Amino acid sequence: MSDLKPVVTPAELRARLDRLPRLSLADLPTPLLDCPRLSEALGGPRILVKREDLTGMAFGGNKIREFEYSIAPAVKEGYDVLLHGAASQSNQSRVTAAVAARLGLKAVMVGKKDAHSDQINGNLLLTHLFGAEVHLVENEAEKVAVIERLRSEGHRVYNTSTDGAPLRSVGYVDGFLELWGQLEARRIHPDALYVCSGAHTHVGLVVGARALGIPLRIVGISPSPRKDAEANAHLARVANENARILGLDLTFTAEDIESYGEYAGPSYGVVTPAAREAVQLAARTEGLVLDPVYTAKTLGALIQHIRQGKFKKGQTVVFVHTGGTPALFAYGEEIL
Ligand SMILES: Cc1ncc(COP(=O)(O)O)c(C=O)c1O
């Protein structure tokens, strides 16, 4: 890792964030809570949970914080459709639909026909409820056809995955500032932070820490199997784009990113034994609800690392709960 001198003060970072267009969607700050019974059950470090599942509207989650920045250009530039397509139980499709409703825009979901698309439950139920036009498709060609049809009808389509994507990680530079302020106020000095590593939440936290010169280990756990070296190089490119947007004199390489694909199991969305145990343990020790696809795998990895002796009593780990809890209702049989 390159040297860790701060390149901005927290106040300057705040000022740079404040110069960007931003919507007001989230209830912030989210709580930072101790999990003493979870720590005790594991005989391990102090565990705190940063409750990004409690960002407020539409069952919350990390996307609400990200969308404050990434959807602002859509509003400014007059787009009239927010579109998203991924798994049938996609959290981002749910949040896209809810935010579109709140902004008075049309929402379109082009999700996949997959193992959880037969029942209208969890995120899929909510996506319908928020008024989205829902398509469940078998292949890319069907998805492209839906988008072309919308364009031919004169709609301006903003894809919440790809459009404004670098601004999603900017949302988590902001999230890092918030979290660091909470830790400082309580004089807590964590040894590590665990977060689901799709891309943007993880990257934003890394950029925020580096910008402030904080030598915090940030461990990203991928919900999909992936090659770590390739993933880390990709995340470093996202981090460089993020730093450019914020005018931060920082350069990231793969060595600056720590992420692991090995805890994802055979494929995205498949519940592993460690993920099932994590969901049950969090629920039964803390009354804390995880989701089966993202946060279960993140906490599952942390539990494994604690059992391997990587973190011990006397140390402190922050687990970032990125939300996704409505998916649980579509995964009942896999979780209990
Ligand atoms: C619950 C949850 N956690 C984490 C992620 C990863 O998001 P990002 O890549 O924006 O950090 C997602 C993305 O879909 C999610 O739904």
Image (cartoon, grey):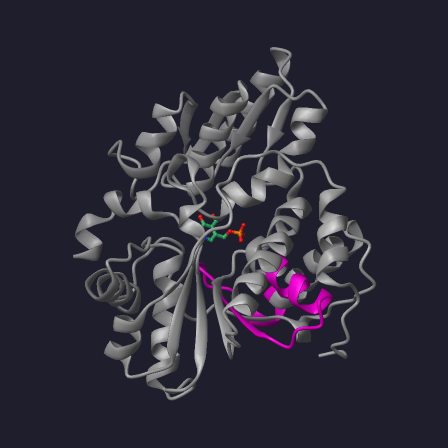
What residue is at 73 percent from the left and 57 percent from the top? 11
Q: Quadrant of the N terminus?
A: bottom right
Q: Position of residue 156 (x, y in %)?
A: 65, 20
Q: Position of residue 143 (x, y in %)?
A: 51, 30
| Quadrant of the rendered image containing residue 250 | bottom right
- Image: 68 above or below 195: above
Q: Is residue 214 magenta?
A: yes
Q: Position of residue 22 (x, y in %)?
A: 66, 36
Q: What is the magenta range?
A: 204-231
- Image: 203 above or below 137: below
Left or right: 95 in relation to 119: right
Q: Position of residue 81 (x, y in %)?
A: 57, 22
The answer to whether any part of residue 264 appears in the image is no
What residue is at 71 percent from the left and 48 percent from the top? 17
Q: Quadrant of the C terminus?
A: bottom left
Question: How many callouts does the rendering have?
Answer: 0
